[in-house]
Image (cartoon, rainbow, N blue to C red):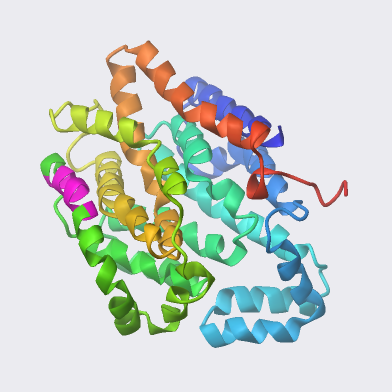
Amino acid sequence: MIYLFVLFFLSYYFYIEEKSSRITKFLPLTLTWSPLLLVFFIIPATQFAVGFDYFVYRGYYAHPDILQIYFNKGEYFFYYVYKFIVKYQLGEQSIFYFAALHNSVIIFFVFYKMRAAKFNVAIIFFLFFTITGIYHNQMNGLRFYMGLVYFPLIALMLSESKYLRSLPFLFLSIMSHFSTVMILLLYPLSFLRRNSHFVFLLFILSPVVFLVSIGVVPYLVELLLNRYSHYLTGGYSQGISIVNFLSKLYYLPLFLAFFFVYLKRRPISKFVPGSSYRNYLEYGILIWAGTYWTIILSLQYGFFFRVQSAFIFFYIFPIYYLIEYCREKGRKYHVIFILLYLIIPYVMKVLIFAQGEYTYKNYLLN
């Protein structure tokens, strides 16, 4: 129930704030959004035993020598943050306070940049919360999600060719969890064409490429990512079930509806050539089209489920485009249908079939 409160409270607040004002300057908007940031932060910060790794991360506080493995991996950001917590005796829960604050600030900064580019942040937040699972999964995959939250920020910078400015965030991402090195894929993708027909070709041809490449994946991992070759034989080597795979295709009807609009060159009004809005929206759609079908590799190698999760933020962009198109055309029933299509499985996930990261216990009340 607490997750539904966060979803509806923040979505409504964003909606009302955007309808009543057009604040774009950083400091005034930060003050206006501060209640939202507090609510967004406090839930993961005060979690208790959510997910499988909660007590593992708490245990490092009593046994800090174990942290050396993260230093050896090159995950210096996480290592030094935790060493700081131990040195100043900030308590076992402090790593969750820090991770929640870090992730919340980065995500809200992305929202701020999108707001400045004239995105409707109420819709963006609603899609972020119901589709990506990032808010929930950060409570278990602590290090991985500390790195993953930089993906949309770096993509935003690359969409405007700010390559040098993106590098500090690239390093922070990789030094949180080395598997986020896959973020490097964003750089060559930024040079690809972004017109609708190329994006469609990328979307329909990439599953063929991934199917054909299943047999050579072990060789590529051995050659390019040797330190992760053990994932192909360990616990992550087991592929996901067909049922799990099919569940990941739930949003496919919306994606196909998006292409129906996108390929007919029916732009939304803010889709102005050269604008930050268009640059980021087009680039986000391109990233989604190029990475969506990585889920196919998960049928053989479970590790690639994490790859798919790393780029799940970009699911937002085609659905956002579709919603904005329907809104501008006055098709309110289409918008309502899309929102219901998104929220019904989410409600079922947190109320009826809640497990793992979709359950919640509070550290302060435990």
Total numbered labels placed on residues in the image? 0
Note whether 322 is above or below 100 in the view shown. above
Is residue 203 on the magenta stretch?
yes
| In the image: residue 198, left or right of residue 164 | left
254 vs 144, nearest the viewer: 254
Residue 77 screen position, x and y as percent: 57, 75
Let me know if residue 173 appears in the view: no
Task: Give the residue displayed 53% in from the left and 31% down from the top.
Answer: 345
365 vs 103, nearest the viewer: 365
Residue 123 screen position, x and y as percent: 45, 30
Task: Give the residue displayed 78% in from the left and 81% down from the top.
Answer: 63
**Which SS type dominates the magenta stretch?**
helix
89 vs 69, nearest the viewer: 69
In the picture as drawn, the residue positioned furthest to the front comes out as 242
Give the position of the N terminus as an image quadrant.
top right
Is residue 156 on the magenta stretch?
no
Res 68 → quadrant: bottom right
Residue 165 screen position, x and y as percent: 36, 65
Q: Which residues are magenta?
A: 198-207
Task: Give the residue displayed 31% in from the left and 19% down from the top.
Answer: 326
Residue 125 screen position, x and y as percent: 50, 36
Res 40 → quadrant: top right
| In the image: residue 269, left or right of residue 128 | left
Note whether 112 is above or below 328 in the view shown. below
Let me know if residue 121 appears in the view: yes
Task: Give the residue displayed 51% in from the left and 25% down from the top.
Answer: 15
| In the image: residue 203, left or right of residue 30 | left
